[in-house]
Amino acid sequence: MYYIIDPNIQIKKWQGGPAYYLHREGFKRYSLIEEDYELIKKCDGKTDITPCFASEKLELLGIIRPCEKDSACLLPDQIKEYPNYYVRNIDWNISDICNYRCLHCFHTADNSMQRDSFSWEEALRFLDEMRDCGLTGVRLTGGEPTLYPRFREILQAIKDRELRLTTLITNGSNLDEDLISFIKSIHPKTEIRISFDGIGHHDWLRQHKGAEEQFKHAVRLCKEAVLFVYINMNINRRNRDVIFDSVKMLAAMGVDGIRIIKTTEVPRWQLNGENLTLKGTEYYDFCVDFAEKFKNSGINVPVTIWQSLYLDPRKKTFTCLALKSSVCRFDENAPICRPMYNNKPSVLANGDIIPCAPMAGLFASKGIRMDNVKTDGLQKALTSGVFIDAITHTVGEKLRVNPKCGRCSWGKVCQGGCPAVSLLFGGSLLSSDPTKCEFFSSGYYEKYCRILEGWKNLNPI
């Protein structure tokens, strides 16, 4: 019997896996097991295939259909194999230029002004490489990305290559009705991610007078345009007392999601933050207090607390983010950070590619360089080299290299914690994450479960 892949289906396969099929009209993709992928490759309208359970399943899913021999042929690139590792999205710092002077910026190792940027030619070449490496999405950031001289043309160039602008990370100062309307016309499903650091404290942390009012104006305009608005909010000793009231204000403004991030000990914040960083249990005590207030507040916006909790009041569910796995789902061959592996690698304005954006200033302070997409190209960086060596470290490797994590009773659920925090405090991606050691040894998982009793735990041990 002869089969052909449905013309609306595209098949993609990357070095070392995975394989996916996706509909040409959308970005949603579905994974394929190796056995199904090998069968699909034979569905070319020319190869005789004995019907089996796999072919019946693939036909039922609409991936393949029967045909007469030589009556149909595959479309160009309908089966695409990439020599590089799989990366779905990239954080692209298109330019370091910014109109704020944030005290905690993680992109730099000091308080100096940064001026690196992608030229127009470099930007177009990089977008071509993203497409050719099988990426589907771009998270555009900076600096302040809207200050890029040809910002609107970049948005159009992203669309022209059938890439999706998944997220625009901005301080909001440059968003007006005209620009927001343009963004929505080109990328209507883009998430607009805007920073806000608490009522009465935003101007201080951003070192820009009027930043708080600019933020509120930008949120109102985005919500009037029915765009998805997500807020990043820093917490430190100076602003922690206004965080809950700030969340209530943001919920009333109609934002769609909020992420609270501990102002972390990156190089620039260490220069400017004095003793304002929340330490160890101080941060987790805040999380417990926040969760208790939030549970019964009537706020209906999901909140993520960095490395700690995800709270969804709409469904009355929570997830402890310090847990990467349950014991029964432990996979020693999993990468030490799955988002770092395929969903959040960061390309800096100078072309350097690093595992995740918050590592930028830390790498600069330590003189660490990996690969560079401007000089060597993206496909090379995603095929072999220092960057690939870093992101393909496995959980099993970390637990073996690091005896402290390997012996720990929480090792299989913590999996050594966050690699970025491990690098910050231990000097290596494979070091232990001391913040997680304190989390588990002090019983915060049990505290969260007790405080949130009555809500469903989506990641129980």
Image (cartoon, rainbow, N blue to C red):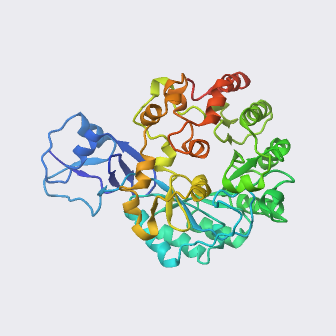
User: x%, y% of residue 41?
Assistant: 23, 50
User: x%, y% of residue 18?
Assistant: 35, 46
Q: Look at the picture and state if 209 lies above or below 396.
A: below
Question: The N terminus lies in which quarter of the figure?
Answer: top left
Q: Nearer the viewer, residue 144 or 454?
A: 144
The residue at the far right in this view is: 200
Q: Nearer the viewer, residue 57 or 275?
A: 275
User: x%, y% of residue 281?
Assistant: 73, 32
What residue is drawn where x is 70% and y is 52%? 231
Q: Is residue 161 visible to the viewer in this orientation of the structure?
A: no
User: x%, y% of residue 136?
Assistant: 45, 57
In this rendering, position of residue 206 left or right of residue 190: right
- Number of labels in the image equals 0
Q: Look at the picture and state if 231 lies above or below 107.
A: above
Question: The C terminus lies in which quarter of the figure?
Answer: top right
What residue is drawn where x is 75% and y is 63%? 218
Q: Nearer the viewer, residue 130 or 356?
A: 356
Quarter residue 242 falls in: top right
Q: Is residue 82 visible to the viewer in this orientation of the structure?
A: yes
Q: Look at the picture and state if 277 lies above or below 136.
A: above
In this rendering, position of residue 204 left or right of residue 413: right
What residue is drawn where x is 58% and y is 59%? 364
In this rendering, position of residue 440 left or right of residue 389: right
